[in-house]
Each structure stands twice: as structure tokens, then as C-alpha cells.
């Protein structure tokens, strides 16, 4: 029964995920429905009880492979009577959609909210006439206008600049950086949903011999296009009597956005976001049992380690050296489902899904030891960043 303390809180009460694959033939809206149905069953809710839908970044009409399903599509396909919806790029990274849903239930606008992220970038490449952007007239606009003139057309280029500074200024080696990808590979081998992405464990030799993409990032430092949908259900504290799934409280959240046009940013958005997260809770880094850090590129978890204060600035590569501290049985188990490097580019939502799975003790072979109670999940980390602190209390 909800107490006066819990009534004003927001909880994750259900999680779901579709098949994860590469060039899946299943339509992305059907993948989304698969994940929604799994999350509803997990929470013990009926679709008639859902009254809000939140997503990031909304339907990307110019590049459907990146985001082929919008909130309107879900409302229509599932027959939802929604009181509030939001799906837009103008948010501080992917997990901010869950944060905004938490605000909606805290304010009493909604009781049970579906938050989702659907990607179809691998499948879209197989059907470019439908999902991929058409070739333009050679001009650029929007955020690309600040990067394309310098041939920085990929996020790998942007992230590599921060990583290369750690090489020059702080002495990061490729052997240290490799621990993120190797750890993700080990964990992915224990994740049944990662089989289409990781089929064998990555070795240090294989990593070091891989081709470079943007120095110092190599092929295995970059996540792989994949097709999947991930869903998180956020419920109001005074609606917990209606759910069957074990609730996980959203204890704190934070976000940060930097200017894309500014080329002299000292630290990426993960540092501002990480510092702010702890201002909104009595928990500290000492309380965290597992970290699920965005790893679209292997260097980004290092920025989150530093930004959240698990180590000092410029010390993240030393924290992960050898891989023992971030292993499943280590001091800070990291990306226990494999992360995006090992389990597919789920674009942020996979980290919230895995954090809840670990806190509930349902990780199967990849479950961390003991009784984890607090987890951090993040998304982005470059010009956009969002973080959630989740607690089982």
C-alpha cells in the first residue's frame, strides 16, 4: 500500500525489450509493440491503465532509421487514451524522457506512463528508400552546420577529440581504453538478447589489431547499428497498488546540454550532469552497486566515471585498468548486459532496462553478486547528457 512518503515519488514498475538484431525483417512498430507488451506483463498492467507516452527523440521524418516510431504511432497502434505525451530531440539526451515521465506522475498528470526508444538503423540500411535520408544538394543545416565543414560528420570524430586529450594530457593508453569494450563483450556473452551482436569474446590482441576509426578510437570502440525497441513503464507512487512488478524508485535525475556551435568546450556534458545528480539526493557514489554508462563510444564511460565522481578528472582510464574494478564481481560492475558495444545500439534505454533488471536480481548468468540496491544509468555524454539514479528501497 502506498504511504505518504511514496505517494509523491516516481517508480519504474515494468521493463520490456523486443528482439535485438541486425537487419530484422520485423517492422519497427511491431518491435515496439513487442517491448510494450513485455513491459505491461512485467508490471502487471493493462494497456487501458496507461495514460501517458514519452520518448526520445520523436519520429525522425528525415532519417526514419534513427527513430522510426513516434508517440502518436504508439498511441494509435495500442489504443492508448493519453493525458500527456512528449517526443522530441529538444531534451538533454535519451533518458530524459524517463525523467520527464517521472515529473508527470509526480505532479499527478499521469499514473502509468510508457517510455520507449526504438531504433532501426541496421534494418534501415537494408531498405534505404524508406528509412534512410535522401541525398541532398550538398548543403548542411541544423547541428551539422557546425561540424560538417571540418569533415567531422560522425559522432566518432567528436568523441575522439575528447579521448585524444586524455591520451596527451593524462596518459591514457589503448590497452586501458580497451577494457570498456572487453568488459562489455564478456558480459554480452551472458546476455541471451545480445547473440546477434556479440558471438565471441573480444580479446586484447583482436582489439589492438582492429582498424582505427578516429584516433584513438578503433572499430571495437564504436557501437554497432542494430534494430530493437526498449520500454520502461513509470508509475506514480500512489498507483503502486495497481502494479505487480517490483517497483524501483527514480531517486534522482539530471541533464545537461552544451552548444553544438562552440568548439572550445573544456569538458563534455557528462561532467556537469554528473555533478548535478548528487545535488538531488542523499545517496553518494559509495552507495552505488552497479553503473550502466552510455558507451556509444568506449571513451564515454570514462567521462561518466569522472563526471559522476567515481574518480578524479583525468583518472578514469586508471580506474578501469585491467578491468577488475568494473567486472561483474568488481568494485563497480559496469554495463552488465554488455552495453551498446556488446549488446547493440539501443540508444540509451538499454541502460535503464539493465539497471532495473540488476536491482531486481533478474540478471540470470550476468547477475552481480549480493543484493544490489542502487544503480546509476546514463545516456549521451558529449553535448547532451542525462542520468538517472535508481534505488530499490
Image (tube, rainbow, N blue to C red):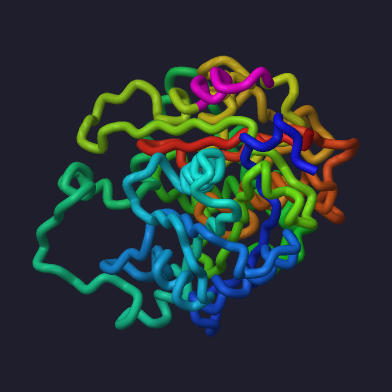
Report the residue at 45% width, 49% height from top: 212
Q: Residue at 62% across / 64% down in the picture?
A: 49
Location of residue 209 in the rendering, given as x and y in whole percent from the top left corner: 57, 50
Outermost top residue: 312
Considering the image in quadrants, where does the N terminus appear?
Answer: top right
Left or right side of 248 for 264? left
Dividing the picture into quadrants, the one containing residue 131 is bottom left
Could one spot residue 271 in this view of the protein? yes
Nearest the eye: 107 or 211: 107
Q: Is residue 195 above or below residue 14?
A: below
Task: From the top left corner, tell me how far across and down residue 380 is, in percent.
Answer: 46, 42
Q: Is residue 390 above or below residue 110?
A: above
Instruction: Write down the region rendered in magenta.
Output: 274-283
Residue 205 is a magenta residue:
no
- Which residue is drawn at the image coordinates 72% and 35% (left, top)? 391
The answer to whether residue 44 is left or right of residue 48 is: right
The dominant secondary structure in magenta is: helix
Quarter placement of the C terminus = top right
Q: Examine the rendered structure and indicate whether residue 22 appears above or below residue 338.
A: below
Tally of marks: 0
Residue 318, how many percent across, how many down? 63, 23
Confirm whether residue 299 shows in the render: no
132 or 393: which is nearer to us? 393
**Along the viewing direction, whichever of 57 and 339 lies nearer the viewer:** 57
Q: Position of residue 233 (x, y in %)?
A: 62, 55
Amino acid at each position: 500500500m502506498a504511504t505518504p512518503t511514496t505517494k509523491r515519488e516516481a517508480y519504474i514498475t515494468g521493463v520490456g525489450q523486443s528482439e535485438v538484431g541486425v537487419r530484422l525483417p520485423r517492422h519497427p512498430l511491431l518491435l515496439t509493440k513487442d517491448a510494450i507488451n513485455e513491459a505491461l506483463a512485467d508490471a502487471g498492467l493493462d494497456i487501458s491503465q496507461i495514460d501517458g507516452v514519452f520518448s526520445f527523440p520523436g519520429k525522425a521524418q528525415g532519417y526514419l532509421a534513427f527513430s522510426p516510431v513516434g508517440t502518436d504511432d504508439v498511441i494509435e497502434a495500442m489504443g492508448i487514451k493519453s493525458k500527456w505525451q512528449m517526443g522530441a530531440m529538444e531534451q538533454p539526451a535519451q533518458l530524459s524522457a524517463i525523467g520527464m515521465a517521472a515529473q508527470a506522475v509526480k505532479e499527478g498528470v499521469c499514473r502509468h506512463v510508457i517510455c520507449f526508444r526504438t531504433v532501426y538503423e541496421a534494418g534501415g540500411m537494408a531498405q534505404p528508400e524508406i528509412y534512410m535520408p535522401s541525398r541532398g544538394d550538398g548543403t548542411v543545416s541544423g547541428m551539422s552546420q557546425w561540424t560538417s565543414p571540418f569533415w567531422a560528420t560522425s559522432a566518432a570524430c567528436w568523441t575522439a577529440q575528447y579521448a585524444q586529450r586524455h591520451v596527451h594530457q593524462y596518459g591514457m593508453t589503448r590497452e586501458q581504453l580497451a577494457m570498456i569494450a572487453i568488459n562489455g563483450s564478456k558480459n554480452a556473452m551472458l546476455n541471451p538478447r545480445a547473440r546477434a551482436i556479440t558471438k565471441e569474446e573480444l580479446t586484447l590482441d583482436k582489439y589492438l589489431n582492429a582498424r582505427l576509426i578516429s584516433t584513438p578510437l578503433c572499430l571495437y570502440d564504436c557501437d554497432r547499428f542494430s534494430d530493437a525497441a526498449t520500454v520502461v513503464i513509470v508509475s506514480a507512487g500512489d498507483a503502486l497498488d495497481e502494479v505487480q512488478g517490483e517497483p524501483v524508485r527514480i531517486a534522482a535525475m539530471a541533464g545537461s546540454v552544451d552548444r553544438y556551435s562552440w568548439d572550445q568546450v573544456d569538458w563534455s556534458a557528462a561532467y556537469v550532469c554528473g555533478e548535478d545528480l548528487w545535488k538531488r539526493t542523499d545517496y553518494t557514489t559509495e552507495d552505488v552497486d552497479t553503473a550502466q554508462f552510455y558507451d556509444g563510444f568506449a571513451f564515454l564511460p570514462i567521462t561518466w566515471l569522472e563526471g559522476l565522481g567515481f574518480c578524479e578528472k583525468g583518472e578514469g582510464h586508471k580506474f578501469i585498468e585491467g578491468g577488475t574494478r568494473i567486472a561483474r564481481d568488481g568494485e563497480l560492475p559496469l554495463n552488465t548486459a554488455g552495453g551498446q558495444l556488446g549488446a547493440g545500439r539501443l540508444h540509451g534505454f538499454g541502460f535503464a532496462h539493465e539497471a532495473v533488471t540488476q536491482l531486481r536480481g533478474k540478471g540470470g548468468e550476468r547477475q552481480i553478486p549480493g543484493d544490489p540496491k542502487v544503480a546509476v544509468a546514463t545516456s549521451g555524454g558529449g553535448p547532451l547528457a542525462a542520468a538517472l539514479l535508481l534505488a530499490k528501497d
